[in-house]
Image (spheres, rainbow, N blue to C red):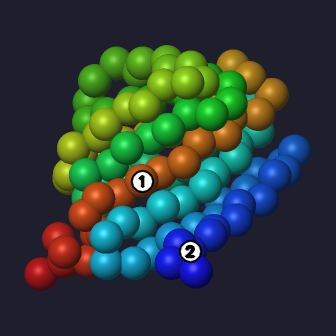
Amino acid sequence: MIETAYEFKTSDTKLVEKIINDDNVHINHIILEKGQNMPEHFSNSNVYLIIVKGEMRLTLSDNEPNDHIHGSIVNVPYNTKMLIRNVNTPLMEFFVLKSPNPKYYEE
């Protein structure tokens, strides 16, 4: 078998799980309940946020927050200050794809 299969969990409560961390890509799966957020931080790679459920409120650098709904893919450039929040929906689920793997940005 050539392919590698990866699994991710389902949940009705907060979940943060690392799915893949190899030379090519870093993929996380995250579920946030209404009122929850990820800690504000700077992106450590070129980041793609794939929203599969709910609505994400995303604030980048010092800009106004923008809302993105399920079915959206949002690109966040390397070294951009970001805050991800769920303010409107019971559950927000998304995947974080970092490419290249953040280790290539480390000094």
Identify the residue at horizontal 35%, vertical 57% (top origin): 98
Total labels: the figure holds 2
Which of label 2 and label 1 is nearer to you? 2
| Precedes in sequence: disc 2 or disc 1 | 2
Vertical placement of residue 101 versus 53, above or below:
below
Image disc number at residue 97? 1
Identify the residue at horizontal 39%, vertical 78% (top origin): 22
* Relative image position of residue 30 (x, y in whole percent): 63, 51
Image disc number at residue 4? 2
* Relative image position of residue 19 (x, y in whole percent): 58, 68
Image disc number at residue 36? none
Indicate the amino acid at tag 2: Thr
Quadrant in which the C terminus appears: bottom left
Indicate the amino acid at tag 1: Leu
Farthest residue, direction left: 107
Q: Nearer the viewer, residue 97 or 58?
A: 97
Quadrant in which the N terminus appears: bottom right
Identify the residue at horizontal 51%, vertical 78% (top origin): 2
Farthest residue, direction front: 1
Task: Describe the element under mark 1 as helix, strand or loop.
Answer: strand
Q: Is residue 67 left or right of residue 105?
A: right
Q: Residues within 10 Å of mark 1 (few under 14, many from 20)?
A: many
Q: Is residue 46 left or right of residue 55?
A: left
Q: Nearer the viewer, residue 69 or 34?
A: 69
Dividing the picture into quarters, in which one does residue 62 lie? top left
Q: Nearer the viewer, residue 61 or 4?
A: 4
Task: Describe the element under mark 2 as helix, strand or loop.
Answer: loop
- Asked if residue 31 can be seen in this view, the reply is yes
* Relative image position of residue 86 (x, y in whole percent): 64, 31
Dividing the picture into quarters, in which one does residue 81 lie? top left
Q: Residues within 10 Å of mark 2 (few under 14, many from 20)?
A: few
* Relative image position of residue 11 (x, y in whole percent): 84, 50
